[in-house]
Amino acid sequence: MLYRLKASETTTIVNARSLANFHTSAAVRVCLGADLLDARAAVLPTSVLMAAALPISIGLSAEKRTAVREGTRPLVIPAVKPLLLPSVLPPVRPGVTERLLELVHDVNGIDNLLSLLAIVEHAAA
């Protein structure tokens, strides 16, 4: 199927899906092929056609593709491996767990507690 962009433009857009079923004379097909080579016509590709020619990712938004090109984002986000916790916790004195829970509550969450522990560890080093 052929499409014209505007009356003032001479570029013909050819839908790639229709090329396989483009029933016309050999002369018209030859002229269309020459127009494609001369860039007087363009092919509107399908995702299958593009995937055959290039490794494409349809799921990436334009912003994500820009970030990949700039190197600020990986093409594939690596999977996070689950943290393996020990099956048996080390023995602790009675009341330590309760004090730890109180401390987490006092510093407004485990993230703040871990940050404080990192600061203390860095100061001690």
Image: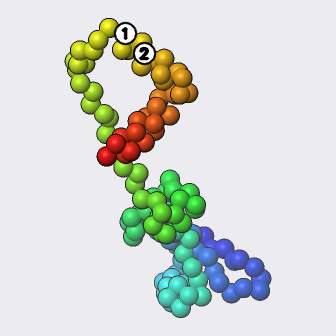
Q: Nearer the viewer, residue 3 or 100?
A: 100
Q: Nearer the viewer, residue 48 or 88?
A: 88
The three-letter code of the residue at mark 2 reads Arg
Q: Secondary structure at mark 1?
A: loop
Q: Position of residue 99 (x, y in %)?
A: 42, 15
- Which of the 4 image quadrants contains residue 101? top left
Q: Residue at x 49, y 88 (%)?
A: 37
Q: Position of residue 90 (x, y in %)?
A: 23, 19
The three-letter code of the residue at mark 1 reads Gly
Q: Residues within 10 Å of mark 2 (few under 14, many from 20)?
A: few
Q: Secondary structure at mark 2?
A: helix
State whether residue 112 is above or below residue 5: above
Q: Position of residue 32 (x, y in %)?
A: 54, 84
Per the rendering, the mark at residue 10 is none
> Which residue, given by chain and number where applicable, does mark 2 sit on?
99
**Outermost residue toward the front?**
124
Q: Is residue 97 visible to the viewer in this orientation of the structure?
A: yes
Q: Is residue 42 left or right of residue 53?
A: right
State whether residue 4 is above or below residue 117: below
Q: Is residue 68 left or right of residue 13?
A: left
Q: Nearer the viewer, residue 7 or 19?
A: 7
State whether residue 51 is above or below residue 25: above
Q: Is residue 31 visible to the viewer in this orientation of the structure?
A: no
> Which residue, given by chain and number where applicable, does mark 1 sit on?
95
Q: Residue at x 58, y 83 (%)?
A: 41
**Outermost residue toward the top?**
94
**Outermost residue toward the right?**
7
Q: Residues within 10 Å of mark 1 (few under 14, many from 20)?
A: few
Q: Residue at x 23, y 15 (%)?
A: 91
Residues marked 2 and 1 touching at CB (< 8 Å): yes
